[in-house]
Amino acid sequence: MKRILVSVQEASADRLAADLVTALRTRVDVEVEGLAGPAMLAAGVRPISAPPMDPVMGLVEVVRHLGVIRKRRRALLEAVARKPDLLVVVDSADFHLPVAAIARRMGVPTLGYVGPQLWAWRPGRARTVAASLDHLL
């Protein structure tokens, strides 16, 4: 049985990931765990940390939620260290791409689901995505 680790940070990504997990389960025998919200939990994903937060943008909001962000990142990195067969990260590039890069260096295949708007981000974002993800849907 394949083990897949899926990570989301907000409600819209949770719904997209739940649909992906549901579709995968109709085709492949998989065990899925991850940073999951209510939709992913309903799809049978085993949670590794607290549910996703509301979107956090801007320096003040990030600093205010830093403890939760760090806890979720630590839980995700611990799950990556268990070497799943695949890491799927959904949206939230600033949170997910550094973790995906670490997973990739550890030999864990990485898949991005919902890519960042490269044109709207800082220079070099395309290289960061390419260095972090094996595939981007």
Image (spheres, rainbow, N blue to C red):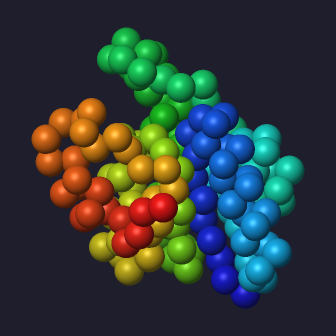
Residue 22 placement: quadrant: bottom right
Residue 21 visible from this viewpoint: yes
Q: Position of residue 61 (x, y in %)?
A: 43, 16
Residue 120 placement: quadrant: top left
Position of residue 62 relative to residue 113, above or below, is above
Q: Quick one: which residue is furthest to the front in this view?
A: 119
Residue 43 placement: quadrant: bottom right
- In this view, the residue in front, 118 or 2, is 118
Q: Position of residue 59 (x, y in %)?
A: 33, 17
Identify the residue shown where x is 80% and y is 50%. 41
Q: Quick one: which residue is furthest to the bottom in this view?
A: 1
Q: Quick one: which residue is furthest to the top in this view?
A: 60
Position of residue 31 relative to residue 125, above or below, is below
Q: Position of residue 76 (x, y in %)?
A: 52, 55
Identify the residue shown where x is 66% and y is 48%. 16
Identify the residue shown where x is 42% and y is 21%. 57
